[in-house]
Amino acid sequence: MNKVTKMFFLLLSFLAFSFCLFQLTQRYLSTTSYVRCTSNTLILDAGHGGEDGGTVSVSGVPESGINLSIGLKMDQIAGLYGVQTLLIRTEDTSIADNSAQTLREKKRSDLHNRVAIVNQTQGAVLISIHQNNHPQKSARGPQVFFHDDENSKAWAEQTQTFFKTGLMPENHRQATKISSQVYLMNHIDCCAILVECGFLSNQEEDLLLQSDEYQSKIAAILMGSYLAYQS
Ligand SMILES: [Zn+2]
């Protein structure tokens, strides 16, 4: 198969998957109702970047690039649905101030700047994208965390359900309130979820998370849940 044909089939399978997800969303909406956040802008926060690569996979790949790929794919889907987005970063860079010197200072400045962007955006709703790591190598599957408010909780629970239905039926993880240790999620004042898309400490999931197709599925599920939540 030449490159163009391959791209065409990849796009076709991506669209087919997005359509299935849209159907799933509509079915879910007809059976569920609760208060929702009003959003003008979906902020896509690809975790880490630059010198701070985040967790490193068993095959030696930092999570920052995977987070960015998924964020960019979400942005493409958002464009198809007319959703206004704001990407915290579009390249593998930190958004720390130039005055920050040490890695510690850079990480702190980067997080402060992310918080400022979110809190200065009117009608913002945030998805923060990350990858997980656990000493127990068998740990796998996406996990959704929520900002401490009822709407974010409902959105996170719905997203976790979408992951179970659309990606990994054997994943029994529950949406969980974010730890008080996560700076960004505890300093913003809008609806927000943080998604650990999978475990880079798991050999099989590490390879999946690096593949274009699996990243597209994750992006489609996250956007499907967002669209359902906004409807
Ligand atoms: Zn991370």
Image (cartoon, rainbow, N blue to C red):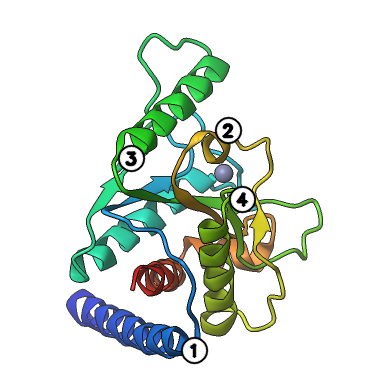
Look at 38% across and 29% down and name the residue there: 116
Callout in the foreground (2, 4): 2
Q: Please name the residue that numbered disc 3 is placed on.
A: 89
Q: How far apart are the alpha carbons under marks 4 and 3?
A: 21 Å
Q: How far apart are the alpha carbons under marks 3 and 1?
A: 36 Å
Callout in the foreground (2, 1): 1
Q: Three-letter amino acid code at disc 2?
A: Tyr
Q: How far apart are the alpha carbons under marks 3 and 2?
A: 18 Å
Callout in the foreground (4, 3): 3
| Residue 104 or residue 53, whichever sits in front | 104
Q: Position of residue 110 (x, y in %)?
A: 44, 26
| Residue 147 or residue 143, whichever sits in front | 147
Look at 69% across and 55% down and name the residue there: 201
Q: Earlier in the sequence, mark 1 or mark 4?
A: 1
Q: How far apart are the alpha carbons under marks 1 and 4?
A: 39 Å
Q: Please name the residue that numbered disc 4 is placed on.
A: 57
Q: Quadrant of residue 94?
A: top left
Q: Earlier in the sequence, mark 4 or mark 3?
A: 4
Mark drawn on residue 63: none
| Residue 36 or residue 176, whichever sits in front | 36
Q: Secondary structure at mark 1?
A: helix
Q: Please name the residue that numbered disc 1 is placed on.
A: 31
Q: Are marks 1 and 4 in contact (CB under 8 Å)?
A: no
Q: Secondary structure at mark 2?
A: helix
